[in-house]
Image: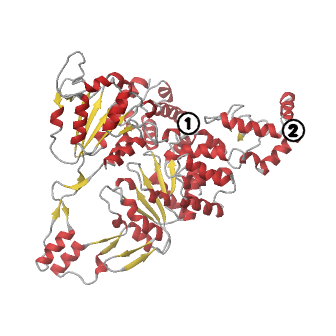
Amino acid sequence: MRQNPGYIVSPELARAVEVAVHLQRPLLLKGEPGTGKTLLAFHLAEQLGAPLQRWQVKSTTKAAEGLYVYDTVRRLHDSRFGDGDVKDIERYMSLGPLGLAFESEARCVVLIDEIDKADPEFPNDLLHELDTMSFTIFETRRTVVAKQRPVVVITSNNEKELPDAFLRRCVFHFIEFPGPDLMAEIVRVHHPDLDRTLVDAALARFFRLRALPGLRKPPSTSELVDWLSALALGGVAPELLASHGLPFAGTLLKTEQDFAIAAKRGR
Amino acid sequence: MLFARFFYGLRSAGVPVSTHNWLALLQALVHGLHGQELRGFYEVARCLLCSSEAHYDAFDRVFAETFRDVDVQRAPMLEALRAWLEDPARHPGLDAQALAALQALDLDALRRELAERLQTQRERHEGGSHWIGTGGTSPFGQGGIHPTGLRLGQGGGKTALAVASARRFADYRRDRVLDTRQIGAALRQLRRMGRRGDSSELDIDATIDASAKQAGDLELRYRPPRKNDMRVLLLMDVGGSMDPSAHLVERLFSAATRSGGFRELRAYYFHNCVYGEVYEDAGFSRAVSTGSLLHLPGVHWTLIIVGDAAMHPSELSMASGRWWAAESGHSGLEWLRTLRGRFARSVWINPDPPQFWNARSLAIIGEIFPMVPLSLEGLEELVASVR
């Protein structure tokens, strides 16, 4: 996988992507919030020059919605008021993200985002469709077969355990929280023009803060990037960070308890 | 055979590798996705054989054990080593002492030493002159600048073995104690979905039925959305021998209140054993009779008791924690049995690691309640036992 200038991958993740694309298996990404799981799909699509179909999963999402939705209410409505051709059921079928990717002439990247939000049975309901890359629209008996097997990227925040049968079929990668070196690279991508001494001081301060025991929500990459913007805009001097100050703490810490911990032990 | 040893090594270390995953790995190797190097093989094998970060640590250990010798035996590296050892004079910048020391090393010694260092080295390492890692002047590892610049493997990064031996994933093991989010995630598996509340969701099937009955005249039917129906009664032991576990119990409590998403959660405190009264606060000032808990309104209650269950056996047969007062009434043991009888689904969580479960009171309580440790594995057991 070519390194995208806007997105830094570890060698392990690059390999996992390569394996997933070659073996045509879904890539399952887990990791702390803010480690770039969702972004990876966007950048992968960009690199492959493939359209992206994003399926944002919620607690109420049903597996079938990713394939197609049959708008019965509209059909009923039309039949009642005589609008449109009610006999043509196809008019009331709309394909979901997975269905659209199957029908697409070009190879797509499908992002199934936060799969763990849904019911525990949700992943199992997709097994067959992801295996065969086809499904049948029950109402019209039409079978939709993928013209090009899409690249499937699935993210999970680990809120629920995923079923074993589903896990077996995936290429799995856990995105570790970036170490100082990788983080410095990531920051450089987002803030190429920032003063090096400020960046170094901020990074050191950031990792010291994250290492505090007992933080409820340790700040992540995206918070660091925001914080750097704030520091740059506020014209904060690097020396202030070295002397244990924590300006704009609100961009990094999100709970009262964390503020208390940082105030007590962060000095 | 080496790969078979790897496969069974993983399985006996608790990584649930199926033949399905194994075939996928072989397929990947046939495709050459590992780039003919051990580091690549490590990456490919890990993403196909591990389905959870909880297995990374065991995977790393087995990988380092199985392939310890492989990296050393690899032909190109041996060739380079040989050339290097035969002609150290080609490398200027070495002082006489270093040169003599290098010449004194033979290949076997070097190989033995690498194996030895891999065995003793446990932390990630960068720089320095002894351990294996990146940079530095040790003869093993990646990107060394001195004395020869010999590199293991190709490209940037560390060798597979150095990566595997770093054991950076030890924190993700399942038998470790948990943070609030993990507890919340485990508790959420207790969900029991049911429909209740306002009818705000269109019930398509009922609508079609109703409309058909009216000969096509549209009649919309609504139903309540699906919500969690589970109720949880949480009883927590505080004080005394539980003090070291206080932070764990606090995490469990905050996870249950914040992210459990239960229909109802009632939490009470007790000390040592449940007697006639439990308390709404950890300071034991607002008492609630234990008897009233037996008549909680509503269905689908699950009882979760948290405590180390470590006490003198006589404290189980007493009627209160006040051992100096001979009180009458139910003994602690009787209360526990009564609670167990009322709540078909109940479980005892013990924050102490199982290797310390040897007090006699523990065996007695263990006969009444299924007991699990406060770890991810334990909570999974809990979910399985109350489902």
Q: Are marks 1 and 2 in contact (CB under 8 Å)?
A: no
Could you tell me residue B133's position as x and y percent? 67, 38
Q: Which quadrant of the rendered structure holds the N terminus of chain B? A: bottom right
Chain of the residue displaying label 2? B
Name which residue type carries label 1: Arg
Up the image or down, A145 lies above or below B334; here it is below
Asked if both marks, 1 and 2, belong to the same chain, the answer given is no
Q: Where residue B88 is drawn, which disc sits there?
A: 2
Q: Residue at x 16, y 34 (%)?
A: B291
Element assignment for label 1:
helix
Between B241 and B228, the one lying in front of the other is: B241
Q: Alpha carbon of mark 1 to alpha carbon of mark 2: how far?
A: 41 Å
Going by the image, does A104 lie left or right of B49?
A: left
- Nearer the viewer's eye, disc 1 or disc 2? 2
Residue A43: image location, x then y, percent: 50, 57
Could you say which quadrant of the image residue A90 lies in? Answer: bottom left
In the structure shown, which secondary structural element does the residue marked by tag 2 occupy?
A: helix
Q: B130 or B118, which lies in front? A: B118
Instruction: Tell me residue A200's x, y (percent).
Output: 54, 34
Write the residue at 58% across / 49% down. Answer: B10
Q: Is residue B241 above or below residue B16?
A: above
User: Residue A196 shows which numbered tag?
Assistant: 1
Mark identifier at residue A23: none
Please give the name of the residue rendered at 23% of the width and 15% of the height, measured from the top-left corner: B324
